[in-house]
Image (cartoon, rainbow, N blue to C red):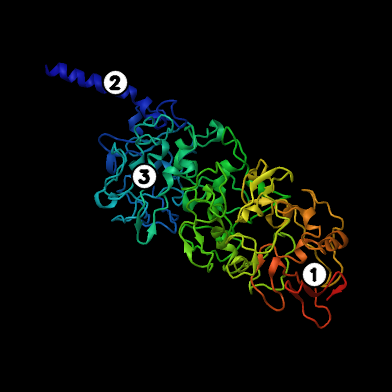
Amino acid sequence: MKRVGLAWIVLLASQAWGQSGDVLGVHDLSTTASPVRGTMSASCLYCHAPHSGANKALWNQTLSVQNYTQLYTSDTIQNAEVQPTIDDRSTLCLSCHDGTVAPGQMIAYGPITMSQPMSGGLMQRLDSSHPFSLRLPLKDAANLVEGLVATGTTADNTQSVKLINGNIECNSCHNPHNQWTDKKSLNFLVRDGANSSLCLSCHTTTPRTVNSRDNLLSRWTTSVHAQSQAVVNPGSGLGGYTSVAEFGCQSCHSMHNAGGAADLLHNPTPPPPNIDTTSQSCFTCHNGSNSLLVALPNVFGEYDAPKKGHPYANVSNAHTATEPTVLNQNRHTTCEDCHNSHAAQPTLAFGLPPGIRTSQIGVSGVSGVDGTTPITAAVNQYEICLRCHATSTGKATGSIDYGPLPRRAVAPPDPLNILPDFALTATSTHPVMRDRFSSYPQPSLLPSMLNQDGITAGRPMGIRLFCTDCHNSDDNREFGGAGPNGPHGSRFNHILERRYEISTATTPGSNLLNAYPNPDLSVNGPYAMCAKCHNLSVVLSPASFPLHDKHVNGIGASCSVCHSAHGVMGASGGISGERLVNFDLNVVAPNGTSPISYNRATASCTLLCHGKGHN
């Protein structure tokens, strides 16, 4: 009986040994399963020595003595990574994977020649890989599974994902003895990682607040990146999963050797020049490339010349998860400033203003009352725009020329602060932050906005406007184009959806430099932006203002000479402010000793323009 039992044990052991090459995958350095292979036929011996192994696990591979000077860090990390010690399980993996010790440098049997150097899977820098070997005891964080730190129990129902001696180590996520647990992602995972299941073993989407920080993943499960069935191109190099939803977190994040280190972002290689690292990760799918079998609208194409887009963030002022809501530099424009990648949903229908688009769910905003009070999740679109375009400091025109900027007779100390022009106290304003309220007749106002062809009726005219009704991609699909929506970029100045000319003069009061007498009133003309909502034929008729025809057709003055596109913050210095009348001081000048003025009640103005005095 003993001999029979022993025979069965030997038989089972031999069968398991025979199958190890299939299970070990590329970790079997004894066969052609691995591109890096040696002359020894026993696959286990490349890592283990049964009677003379060093350290834990009867280890046979020479351990690395690398001092890792670059460890993972970010502004949200609660648990700091420390130098892996000789007692960490992770150091066993690093003995091959940090690139300082070649495979085959065995302690018990001496070095052997391998078929080729190991080039893939190296982690010479730990700052671009998911942190492990953390400083104990672990600290709780808002995005960690509740109870993980206290009990060491993950949310993995198979408990394959687990802490190792109370810490995160390589084998918390990887099983070096089985490459095939996840049949699509052949990365020695301890469980199937599809649909973010591996990541959500430790990270939670449950709303939590820990140390005054909210869980940034709380809206993940309903987001477009968690739900999208868009098929990923197998040739994209992203991995073995099928859809964006199946890739889940890996659609944007790389667990090892990430291009965007601080957030483990899956950035292009080589990185696009002059683009902040947080925006680069969005390139993977949103640049019109073949990463998806059906390409998405090319958002980044809106930034290419001859178009002018929102400028990318300065390298020294990149987006961070803990930055203040009011962005005190208007050159800080990253995708994450307007879109929350963990919460955004697809825009399948265009709602009415002023509410946010579904692609902007979960983005912080600023109150339209004072321009400083943060709104944790913006409700209205303009609240997001006010993060940069209200009370923020450090605004500058920068190196990108967006066209001439009018200098208004009545303007706040910061002329780039648009909040006063839209405020409740403004004398007149386009109805962005409050309902249309003018008691004066508006005979030129169309019943519906016109699409980009200048003919087809678009959204019915309401009592509110979006910022993006004017500032939008010039080919946006909301108004008849085929491109992405939003103020990403446009071939027209000031990221306007349509042409809007701003008259200039050599000196204030002199003749106009760019005049448009008898202008083209079509969608191609100089006033196409205004024609989206206003019937220009009515504007030039006596029904609107009798002298419009003389100023526009005769002199060729643009709308911007007399009207502020946003609003007039209030009556001041002889300017009563109705009808958005607020003269551009780059074009008009005082008429002799009389100050510049406009008074609607008396239908009078005093100024010098195009070389002619008005009194």
Given the image, on which type of amino acid does mark 1 rest? Val
Q: Nearer the viewer, residue 233 or 411?
A: 411
**Callout 3 secondary element:** loop
Where residue 111 is drawn, which disc sits there? none
Question: Measuring 80% from the left and 65% from the top, which residue is drawn there?
Answer: 504
Query: Which quadrant would the N terminus be assigned to in this image?
Result: top left
**Apparent side of residue 338 relative to residue 590 in the rendered image (left or right):** left
Query: Which quadrant would the C terminus be assigned to in this image?
Result: bottom right
In the figure, 35 relative to 258: above or below? above
Where residue 587 is drawn, which disc sits there? 1
Residue ranking furthest to the left: 1
Sooner in the amino-acid sequence: mark 2 or mark 1: 2
Q: Nearer the viewer, residue 418 or 1?
A: 418
**Callout 1 secondary element:** loop
Contact check, label 1 and label 3, Cβ < 8 Å: no
Q: CA distance from mark 2 to mark 3?
A: 31 Å
**Apparent side of residue 489 relative to residue 350 in the rendered image (left or right):** right
Q: Looking at the image, how many numbered discs can be counted on the residues?
A: 3
Comparing labels 2 and 1, the label whose residue is closer to the camera: 1
Question: Do we see residue 214 in this rendering?
Answer: yes
Picture coordinates of residue 384 (x, y %)? 54, 58
Comparing labels 2 and 3, the label whose residue is closer to the camera: 2
Picture coordinates of residue 463 (x, y %)? 60, 56
Picture coordinates of residue 247 (x, y %)? 46, 37
Given the image, on which type of amino acid does mark 2 rest? Gln
* Residue receiving disc 2: 15
Picture coordinates of residue 548 (x, y %)? 81, 62
Q: Nearer the viewer, residue 105 or 381?
A: 381
Crowding at dot 2, Cα within 10 Å, few <14 / some 14-19 / many 20+, comes out as: few
**Apparent side of residue 545 relative to residue 73 in the rendered image (left or right):** right
* Residue receiving disc 3: 63
